[in-house]
Amino acid sequence: MKRVLAGVLIGATVLLSSACGSLDRGEHGEISYEVTGDAGTTADITRVLPADAGGTPSVTFPAQKLPAQMHASIAEGTFEVHAVPAKGAAGCRIVVDGTEADKQTGAPGKEVICRATVKKR
């Protein structure tokens, strides 16, 4: 029983180690995006993928509590995040493969947009 358990633990450790080490490899750009604003407020957040990325090009997440942080992965093209705060001003930030690609602050009650381009590897 101890040998079986040890084998399972070793296998799981190897699997998790290899998965974690490959997050920023391959042909896809790993994107983190965040929207900030007044504490306790919400914003409608729209993620826009490049037209050729496959799937739905844009998705809106209504009334997201701020701050909000999300992730995406695309092979290449321009990625956008749009945010419209319920009150106050909102800011957005996009990080591609660990490097800040864009950061913007909007005017109170107005939409803020961040854009980042991912180049094919």
Image (tube, rainbow, N blue to C red):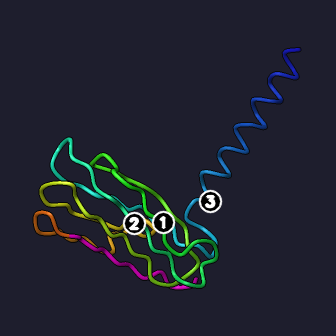
Magenta region's main secondary structure?
Answer: strand
Write down the residue under mark 3.
22
The kind of secondary structure element at disc 3 is loop
Left or right of 55? Residue 70 is left
Instruction: Establish if 15 lies above or below 30.
Output: above
- State the quadrant of the C terminus: bottom right
Magenta-drawn stretch contains 118: yes
Magenta-drawn stretch contains 29: no
Q: Amino acid at mark 1?
A: Val
Question: Residue 18 appears at what percent x and percent y?
Answer: 68, 51
Q: Amino acid at mark 3?
A: Ser
Q: Nearer the viewer, residue 74 or 24?
A: 74
The kind of secondary structure element at disc 2 is strand
Tell me which residue sits at (21%, 55%) in the image. Answer: 86
The mark that comes first in sequence, 2 or 3, is: 3
Question: Residue 78 appears at what percent x and percent y?
Answer: 45, 83
Q: CA distance from mark 2 to mark 3?
A: 28 Å
Disc ID at residue 46: 2
Q: CA distance from mark 1 to mark 2?
A: 6 Å
How many residues crowd mark 3 within 10 Å: few (<14), some (14–19), many (20+)?
Answer: few
Is the residue under label 2 in contact with that under label 1 (CB below 8 Å)? yes
Disc ID at residue 59: 1
Where are the magenta residues, as a range? 111-121
Q: Nearer the viewer, residue 65 or 98?
A: 65
The mark that comes first in sequence, 1 or 3, is: 3
Tell me which residue sits at (75%, 29%) in the image. Answer: 9
The mark that comes first in sequence, 1 or 2, is: 2
